[in-house]
Image: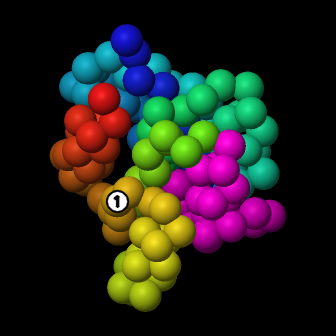
Amino acid sequence: MAMKLLVVDDSNIVRSRIARVVQGGTLGDVTLLGLARNGDEALRAARHAEPDVVTMDLTMPGMDGLACIPALLALHPRSRILVISALDDKSTAIRALRLGAHGFLPKPFSDESLQLALQGLLEHST
């Protein structure tokens, strides 16, 4: 069964890059569920279909990642969230993990590090 991925980031460049890596086929059967610019859009998308994995930026206009993580998990407790953020200060990463995120990848990231991080989440969600 295909895993469904939701990409949440206010940067069009980052959203496109994650989508390109995912659609490259190296992660196996992963379907891109949608691209969201902030937490509000992410929750709207998640109401229509349950994402298995979510990549989540923390700093976004409107609802940010720290507010979106618990809201998303309230909708879909089994979704696995990978935080991808330029905020690589440890306290923010720890806060995101305490709120329910399953992993943290600092920006800038390489395609390989993104693939490895997503692979880890996909393996644990099956």
Q: Say whether residue 69 is magenta.
A: yes
Is 88 situated above or below 57? below
Horizontal side, residue 98 vs residue 119: left or right: right
The kind of secondary structure element at disc 1 is: strand
- Name the residue carrying label 1: 103
Occupied quadrant, residue 62: bottom right
Q: Quadrant of the N terminus?
A: top left
The segment highlighted magenta reads 56-75
Single out the residue that lies furthest toward the top: 1
Residue 110: say if magenta.
Answer: no
Q: Residue, x 60% and y 50% (percent of image)?
A: 73
Q: Nearer the viewer, residue 8 or 50?
A: 50
Question: Dividing the image into 4 quarters, which one contains the C terminus?
Answer: top left
Residue 106 in sight here? yes
The number of callouts visible is: 1
**Which residue occupies the foreground of this view, 98 or 62?**
98
Q: Is residue 93 left or right of residue 113?
A: right
Q: Position of residue 76 (x, y in %)?
A: 60, 40
